[in-house]
Image (cartoon, rainbow, N blue to C red):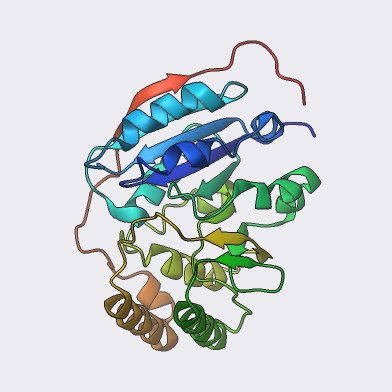
Amino acid sequence: MNNRNRILVFIPAYRCDAQIGRVLSQFDLELQNIVDTIMVVDNQSPDRTVEEAIRAGATYIRNCNFIVWRNNNNYGLGGSHKAAFRFAIENEFDYLVVLHGDDQADIKDLFPRLVSEEYRDLDCLLGARFMRGSRLKGYSLFRTFGNIVYNALFSLVALRSIYDLGSGLNMYRLSAFKEFYYKNFPDDLTFNYVMLLGSYFRKQRVRFFPISWREDDQISNVKLFRQAFRVLGLLGQYAFKRGSFLSRELRGNKFSEYSGSILHSYEVSGVREH
């Protein structure tokens, strides 16, 4: 595969010191040859996430560029996405891959699609935990059922088949996101839900693919029932207001920018084989 398109892998991390090393160990030399840069974005973790990311990067990442970045504020998961999108666009990357830092998704599920380059015809290539071919480990039947119900509701409103509202493995064509229309989207865990509705509203090309997903020692920041009611409220507002809803201010804290600093970087020297 040639590497004419520059791919940035963005790994959002919060309180992931036990998992971030396992996430970075997923990147074998084949994957490192395909992507240009791997970037861990720490969201002001109170633990040793940054230190563990630097240590694991030195151990596993030797054939592509590697960055450990820390947000200047606790922006939330959605805010970390915004910081990564802006960094990628400003540094002229072509695609952004999102892989959560809690080691629930596996980057190798995306690898065949990177090799086949099917992403070239899409704006959003989204991992799905609840479609045929997906594999769940340690995920409760109750939560699986709830996700399937919500996927059906969102599909009904969006008039598209939706198989996951926000997994930990996605890929985006950055040319579709240069206009920072998503700045006012929520900074919390509901960012992905609104982002998906925004993609369909803007007629972006979206495709889902099955992924593997596991839960073992991860720390959940989701208050399940509160989250469920909030998501339902967002969907109801979109159903009746569509574009006017997406243009509203949906954030709690209105950050003027999503900035941070590079704490550690490693740059590949020489020419890599592709």
* In front of the other: 180 or 14: 14
Q: Kindly identify the residue that appears in the image at 67 percent across and 64 percent down.
A: 210
In which quadrant is the N terminus drawn?
top right
Q: Left or right: where does residue 130 sit relative to residue 224?
A: right
In which quadrant is the C terminus drawn?
top right
Q: Left or right: where does residue 233 sit relative to residue 163?
A: left
Task: Give the answer, above or below, for where 102 lies relative to 35.
Answer: below
* In front of the other: 202 or 51: 51
Task: Give the answer, above or below, for where 213 lies relative to 59.
Answer: below
Q: Position of residue 195 (x, y in %)?
A: 46, 65
Q: Position of residue 237 (x, y in %)?
A: 36, 84
* In front of the other: 274 or 147: 147
Q: Kindly identify the residue that appears in the image at 38 percent across and 22 percent down.
A: 264
Q: Kindly identify the residue that appears in the image at 30 percent across and 80 percent down.
A: 225
Q: Position of residue 127 (x, y in %)?
A: 60, 61
Q: Position of residue 201 (x, y in %)?
A: 53, 73
Q: Kindly identify the residue that appears in the image at 59 percent across and 39 percent down.
A: 26
Q: Left or right: where does residue 268 sit relative to residue 143?
A: right
